[in-house]
Amino acid sequence: MSSLQPVTANFSGMLSVTEGAVVMHMLVALLLGLIFGYERFYHGRAAGMRTYGLVCMVSAGLVGISCAPGLWFGGAAAALGPIDPTRTVQGIVTGVGFLGAGIIMQDGLRISGLTTAASVWAAAAIGILAGLGIYFSAVVLTVLSMGFMMWGAWAASFLPTRQPVAMTIKFRRGFSPSQETVRQFALDHGYEIASGTLSISHNNGQAEWNFVAISQGKNKAVPLAELGQKLPLLQGIESFHLSRARN
C-alpha cells in the first residue's frame, strides 16, 4: 500500500494553496493571451486567439509547476533535490521558436509571418511572467505588445523608409534584355535594383529576371499599382509579377 501513497496524496492535495496559485497563474495567462491574440485574429492572421491563449496558458503552467516540485508525485519528488525553473523557461523559448518557424512562409523573394512569429514569442514571455506570479509585468508586456502590433506600422509611416519590392519579369521569346535598360527604368520610377538580388533564367530562348527593387524614398518612388501600369512600357516585356518583398 505504501506505493499508492504518492497517488492518494495527489488527490488529497488537489486544492492546496500552491496548486491553487498555479491554476490562478494559468487563468491569468489565458486571459492575457486571448486579449493579445485578438489583434492577430482581427487582422486575419494564421495564429489567432486560441494559439496565443494556449501559448500563454501552457507557458504559465509549465513555469508554475516547475517552481513547485513539492506537488510532484505527491511530494515524493522532493527527494530529487532542488529543481531549476530556468531550464523550463529555456525549453519554452526553444519550443515556441519551432512554432514560430512554422508560421513564417517564404514565396520566392517574399517572406511573411515574421511579425506573427515574433508576437507568439512575446506571448510565451507573457505566460512565463504570469506563471511566476509577476502579474503587473505580464499585463504591461501585454499592453505594450498589443500597442506596438496595432500602431507600430502607423508610427513607422512617419519615418524615412525604403520599401522593397520583389519583381519577376518575363521577356518575349528571343528578346535579349539589357541590364542597364532595366536598371534605368527602375531609377526613373524611384527604385534601384538591390545589389546581389538579380537572378536570370532562360527557358527555350525566353529570359526571366527576378530581383528586389528598393525605393529611393517615400516621395520619390511611385506606388506599387502605378508601377504595375508603367511596367508594360518596358521594351520586350511579356509578363511580370510585383509584390512586397517582406511582410
Image (cartoon, rainbow, N blue to C red):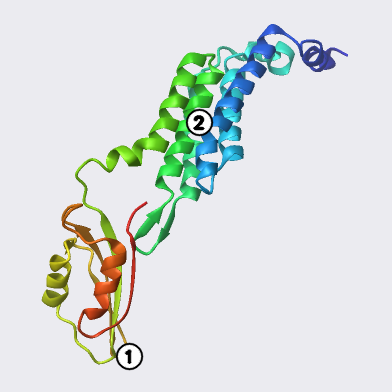
Examine the image and state in which quarter residue 170 appears.
Answer: bottom left
Q: Secondary structure at mark 2?
A: helix
114 up-or-down from 124: above or below: below
Q: Is residue 75 left or right of residue 158?
A: right
Sequence-earlier tag: 2 or 1:
2
Outermost residue toward the top in this view:
17
Q: Which residue is mark 2?
A: 124
Crowding near the residue tagged with mark 2, few <14, some 14–19, many ≥20 C-alpha atoms within 10 Å? many
Residue 189 % position (x, y): 17, 66
Q: Secondary structure at mark 1?
A: loop
Above or below, comparing residue 235 to residue 39 in the picture: below
Q: Callout 1, which amino acid?
A: Asn
Query: What is the crowding at mark 1: few (fewer than 14 residues within 10 Å), some, or many (at least 20)?
Result: few
What is the CA distance from the residue labelled 2 to the residue labelled 1?
A: 51 Å
Label at residue 204: 1
| Residue 2 appearing in the image | yes
Residue at horizontal 37%, vertical 36%?
151
Q: Is residue 189 left or right of residue 138?
A: left
